[in-house]
Amino acid sequence: MFEVRDLDLAGRIGRIKTNHGIVETPAFLPVIHPSNQSIPPQEIRAMGFTTVMTNSYITFRRHGGDAIEKGIHSIIEFDGPIMTDSGGYQILEYGKVNTDPLEIARYQEAIGSDFSNVLDTPTGLGASRRESEESVKKTLESCRITMEGLGHDRKSLWIGPVQGGKYLDLVTTSARYLSSMPFDMFALGSPTEVMESYDFTLLAQMIVTAKKALPLDKPLHLFGLGHPLPLAMAVALGCDTFDSASYVLYARAGRYITETGTRRIQDLEYLPCVCRVCSKISAKQLNEMEVDQRQNKIAIHNLYMLKREIEATKQALREGRLWEYLGVRAKAHPNLWAAFEELAKNSDSFEVFTPSFKFRGLMLSSYPDHLRPEIRRANDRLGTYLSSRPSRPLLILPEGRAGPFVYGKVYERASSVLPIPFMIGYISVPVGFVPGEISDVYPFSQIVNSPGLQGDHRIMDQFIKVLTVQLRSLAPSMTFLVRDEQLDDRVYDLVKTLLEPKFTISKDEYALESTLEQIKKTLGD
């Protein structure tokens, strides 16, 4: 039921097959109230949202058997795939609900839900260790009762809820237990409070912990992600679908979603958006509207912002530039940037999902771009390649900027004139020493560096470690060095210490023919 089309980091564009059509992931599911709809579902559909979420427990209490007879699609007037919640949010808010796991599970099947959720007990952010353990225990028992009670004759796609909150070991326990059960999807519970506190690092840790213990071939839903800010990060970490009623809740509080956060509508002099709402009215006109009309307009705008973010994230993923997009979004809030840095430190875990070849170059702007999976992989592969080469004379030349090094006139002339086989290459931050013969292999000639990379000691400290390993593995019979004035002095101090070049010539003195003559003379002597 889940087909993956594109991968980048741990994010994926995929297709989920349901009884009411295909859901393309990543997908945001607006939450629609089954009885009190702020925006007509047909309008939500017209905005491009093909899938929505509604609450089966509220449907159960307010519509009862009528929803069984008519079906949930008729009740909320939406003809696309529908996900139903089970009442877990009501348990978090009010402590209990008047149903049991099997009753509400059978009800979801009976009303024709495309995606159904087990009646879980969410782990609150402020819950103690003992309370969190109890929520995990109750949720897993509810999952067992539901799956055993429904048996194999299930019409809906069933979602297993992972609980544990900030206690990551409990998240692991919960995810591992659910992995042994016949769920079609999984969901990470209780992130709403984490996001409300802007603790994006904890959110990232929860997602990564759950993903490591869950099957990779099944989608992961993230409950309650209702703001554009952390959405790209959640996709990059492996979440496939999201839901929230935030667009309405924010509107009721007069909160207008922007790319960098929410703003109170009374504080806005301009509307920084060109959606069909904002392009037709001014901030002043919006503020002067009647309350219900203003809330409706803000809610529609908020939905457009969520739609824009999910589409922009998907396009970045499709182009293989999810890392770059995530870095841009992370700059919008210090806590999100901290989460991005934490992700970067553990980016080796994303290497297996990141394509070995991309059709677009890598844009390296600042810390921590040197830690992205493609660069880590390039460092490792260079080390392996260099250690397998036979010892021979080495000529280190400036990198140059005109296309792949191997096709440049300098490399072509040097390789054709030198009397014995040389290894000819260049040093590039942050990948290391690149031999000419592989310089056109991805990503060596497809990297666009900011000059500021070498000004960051964190990048250079890591690079010096990488380069040290590479140069030691080379063990050339002799070395000749033409200095690239664009490189940091530490790089050349390292080269001189480890390889003891026969001579070094600066870029100012650099003339290819005289350098080649000097090399041949040295070889002759």
Image (cartoon, rainbow, N blue to C red):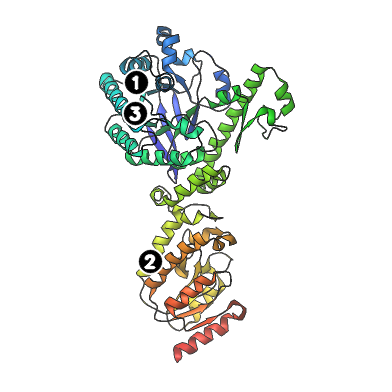
Q: Amino acid at mark 3?
A: Glu
- Mark-to-mark CA distance, 3 and 1: 34 Å
Tell me if label 2 and label 1 are in contact, CB under 8 Å: no
In the image, is 311 to the left or to the right of 101?
Answer: right
Q: Secondary structure at mark 1?
A: loop
Q: Secondary structure at mark 2?
A: helix
The residue closer to the viewer here, 137 or 65, is 137
Label 2: which residue? 385
**Whole-percent x, y for residue 223 in the image:** 44, 29
Answer few, some or many: residues within 10 Å of disc 2's Cα (few below 14, many 20 plus, some between 14 and 19). Answer: some
Q: Amino acid at mark 2?
A: Tyr
Label 3: which residue? 131
Q: Residue at the bottom extreme?
A: 525
Give residue 155's mark. 1
**Whole-percent x, y for residue 17 in the image:** 40, 29
Q: Quadrant of residue 505?
A: bottom right
Please say if 308 is above or below 351.
above
Q: Who comes first in sequence, dot 2 or dot 3? A: 3
**Whole-percent x, y for residue 149 in the image:** 26, 19
Q: Who comes first in sequence, dot 2 or dot 1? A: 1
**Whole-percent x, y for residue 10 in the image:** 42, 44
The residue closer to the viewer here, 90 or 245, is 90
Q: Secondary structure at mark 3?
A: helix
Please say if 328 is above or below 261.
below
The residue closer to the viewer here, 349 or 202, is 202
- Residue name at image x 39 percent, y 61 percent: 380
Position of the N terminus by quadrant: top left
Labels 3, 1: front one: 3
Q: Amino acid at mark 1?
A: Lys
Answer few, some or many: residues within 10 Å of disc 1's Cα (few below 14, many 20 plus, some between 14 and 19). Answer: some
Confirm whether residue 21 shows in the render. yes
- Mark-to-mark CA distance, 2 and 1: 53 Å
